[in-house]
Image (cartoon, rainbow, N blue to C red):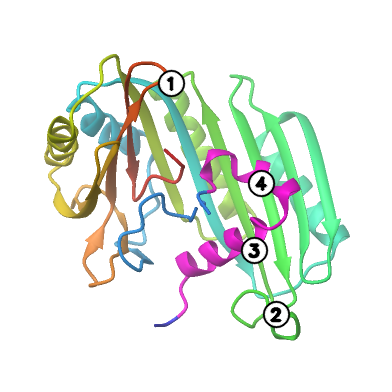
């Protein structure tokens, strides 16, 4: 199967998973990005349904429409972008300069940085906050290519930008989503946006009830289940809606752009719900 950006992301994460000091960069993301996809829809490849940029307001309403249908109360969100910036291998100084530009474009405060020049990759990371208190993270990684066996055999530099907060409002989510998208474009990157909104239901539900919640969420945005997993502790369904502009392809080449995950939360004696588009980029 042709190598795709989603596959590259998964490889990138798996390689980083071997380096414990880097795990913080993926927060709850790293799934193993875990692998970029919390519940991989078969073998996925990234596609874009249109060339028009995503809109934070539209994404917020799309996700909230699905989450409301589950009966969960929204309490947090995550915005994420993964972009291949170029086909070059950059050293630590070059990555730091690029990273400083991204941080400035984002307008982050209280920034802490970390960098490393390794044999098979160059790594730079910054963590800061927006005035709203939203945590934001920028990670740049550059691979030399074939000699080291990194990536897909060609030099490349990739960037991830992640913003997460428990202070969910439409205005804040929308503006930050758009800010991340604009920032990626400002350094000549093509945005590959994803986001999720998380919610909580103060009661534990059965496997059948969890399945009903996930199906109701998909229907609320005009989607039907394409595939999924169902266990006593978690239910995760993926579907496709014409209302969302970006999608991935499942192993059988069907489009997927909304995922609903319902997970038992025994610590709080309730149920966690995640609605993401095109996928839930987090562990749950």
Q: Of the residues tagged 2 and 4, which is closer to the observer?
A: 4
| Disc 2 from disc 4: Cα separation | 23 Å
Question: Magenta span has 242?
Answer: no
- x, y (%) of residue 245? 29, 53
The residue carrying mark 2 is: 145
Find the magenta span and give its range: 3-30
Magenta residues, dominant SS class: helix
- Badge number at residue 168: 1
Labelled pair 2, 3 in contact (Cβ < 8 Å) = no
Q: Which comes before the other along the chain, label 1 or label 3?
A: 3
Q: Marks 3 and 4, how far apart in space? A: 11 Å
Upstream in sequence: badge 4 or badge 1: 4
Q: Is residue 212 left or right of residue 188?
A: left
Q: Nearer the viewer, residue 191 or 235?
A: 235
- Mark 2 and mark 1 in contact (Cβ < 8 Å)? no
Q: Which residue is mark 3?
A: 15
Between circles 1 and 3, the one closer to the viewer is 3
Q: Between 230 and 36, which is closer to the camera in this rendering?
A: 230
Q: Which residue is mark 4?
A: 23
Q: Residue at x 84, y 56 (%)?
A: 116
Q: Quadrant of the C terminus?
A: top left
Circles 3, 4 touching at the beta carbon (< 8 Å)? no
- In screen coordinates, is 174 left or right of 106? left
Asked which secondary structure carries label 3, the reply is helix
Q: Residues within 10 Å of mark 2 (few under 14, many from 20)?
A: some
Residue 184 location in percent, x, y?
A: 58, 52
The vertical placement of 9 against 165, above or below, is below
């Amino acid at each position: 199967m042709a190598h795709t950006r989603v596959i590259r992301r998964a490889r990138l994460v798996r390689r980083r998973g071997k380096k414990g000091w880097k795990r913080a960069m993926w927060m709850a993301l790293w799934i193993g990005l875990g692998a970029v996809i919390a519940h991989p829809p078969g073998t996925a490849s990234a596609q874009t349904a249109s060339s028009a940029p995503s809109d934070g307001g539209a994404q917020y309403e799309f996700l909230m429409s699905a989450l409301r249908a589950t009966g969960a109360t929204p309490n947090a969100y995550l915005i994420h972008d993964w972009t291949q910036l170029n086909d070059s291998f950059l050293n630590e100084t070059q990555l730091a300069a690029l990273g400083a530009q991204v941080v400035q474009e984002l307008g982050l405060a209280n920034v802490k940085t970390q960098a490393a020049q390794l044999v098979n990759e160059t790594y730079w990371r910054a963590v800061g906050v927006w005035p709203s208190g939203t945590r934001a993270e920028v990670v740049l990684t550059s691979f030399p290519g074939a000699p080291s066996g990194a990536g897909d055999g060609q030099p490349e530099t990739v960037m991830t930008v992640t913003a997460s907060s428990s202070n969910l409002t439409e205005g804040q989510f929308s503006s930050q989503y758009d800010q991340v998208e604009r920032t990626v474009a400002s350094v000549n990157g093509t945005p590959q946006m994803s986001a999720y909104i998380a919610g909580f239901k103060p009661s534990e539900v059965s496997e059948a009830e969890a399945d009903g919640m996930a199906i109701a969420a998909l229907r609320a945005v005009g989607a039907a289940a394409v595939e999924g997993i169902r266990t006593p502790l978690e239910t995760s369904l993926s579907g496709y809606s014409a209302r969302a502009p970006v999608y991935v392809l499942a192993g059988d080449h069907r489009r997927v752009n909304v995922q609903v995950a319902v997970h038992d939360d025994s610590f709080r004696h309730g149920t966690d719900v995640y609605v993401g588009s095109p996928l839930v980029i987090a562990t749950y």
